[in-house]
Amino acid sequence: MASNLDGVNLKIVSCTRCDRLVRYCQEISSVKKRMYISEDYWGKPVPSLGNHNAEVLIIGLAPAAHGANRTGRMFTGDMSGAWLFRTLNKYGFSNSPDSFNKNDGLMLKNVYISSIIHCAPPNNKPFQKEVDMCLNFLIEEIKLLKNVKVVVTLGKLAFDGYYKALKVSGYPQKSGQTKPRFGHGARYETPDGKLLISSFHPSRQNTQTGRLTREMFDSIFDIVKTNMDGTFKV
């Protein structure tokens, strides 16, 4: 296990274990999208991002093919990121509502952002074996992020992946406790004593169809702010 989060990120960036994902990231970076044709794509696993002493951990699904796979920074350069950073800025967790590229001056405050998969998967659908292969990075992060009080999972895959990471990390469910169900705004105390809040992912398919509204997404961070003291007012 890496001794610090920078070490984990170095291992993430250099990972080549999933052949399908490696090929896809490289292909997208070569073909590119017309509007980004003059840009150099990152084209490899995207490291996690944020404050190492953060009290809030946010877990997404995976880098977008022309978003983080292009920019090299989590939730940067796509509409999902636009939604997330606007809300983070509103609640004081970032210094800017915008996230365009790695050199735009954005800084996170008291937040660490990771994901279940660190490579862009075709059609945003990783294989289960790819999720399992990448889970070790999240397990290491969970152990190293010692100040986290609240965890926000964006989407069901992130929710399921985080709960599996806890189990593999040695935090079994309490006797008689069943696995919590995913739902927007659902709240649970995790086996390691944190508050887990599940949210719909701010993807286009959710935001453009109205399944996830701005008010719904902001309400997640109302819950986060209310529970920053660790008293779990659920």
Image (cartoon, rainbow, N blue to C red):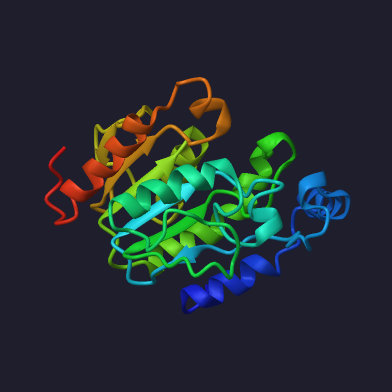
In which quadrant of the rendered image does the C terminus lie? top left
Front residue (pair 143, 220) = 220
Residue 123 image point, x, y percent? 72, 34
Residue 35 falls left or right of residue 80: right
Front residue (pair 130, 202) = 202
Residue 5 falls left or right of residue 69: left
Res 69 quadrant in image: bottom right
In percent of the image, x 54 and y 67: which residue is there? 104
Question: Count of labels shown?
Answer: 0
Residue 227 falls left or right of residue 32: left
Front residue (pair 159, 36) = 36
Vertical side of 130 occupied by 51: above or below: below
Vertical side of 95 occupied by 118: above or below: above
Residue 26 image point, x, y percent? 83, 55
In percent of the image, x 26 and y 33: which residue is there? 177
In percent of the image, x 75 and y 53: which residue is there? 18
Residue 231 falls left or right of residue 119: left
Vertical side of 1 occupied by 189: above or below: above
Asked whether the viewer can see residue 179, the reply is: no
Res 149 quadrant in image: bottom left
In percent of the image, x 44 and y 46: which residue is there? 84
Residue 205 image point, x, y percent? 57, 26
Front residue (pair 119, 102) = 102
Residue 62 image point, x, y percent? 60, 47
Asked whether the viewer can see residue 73, the reply is: yes
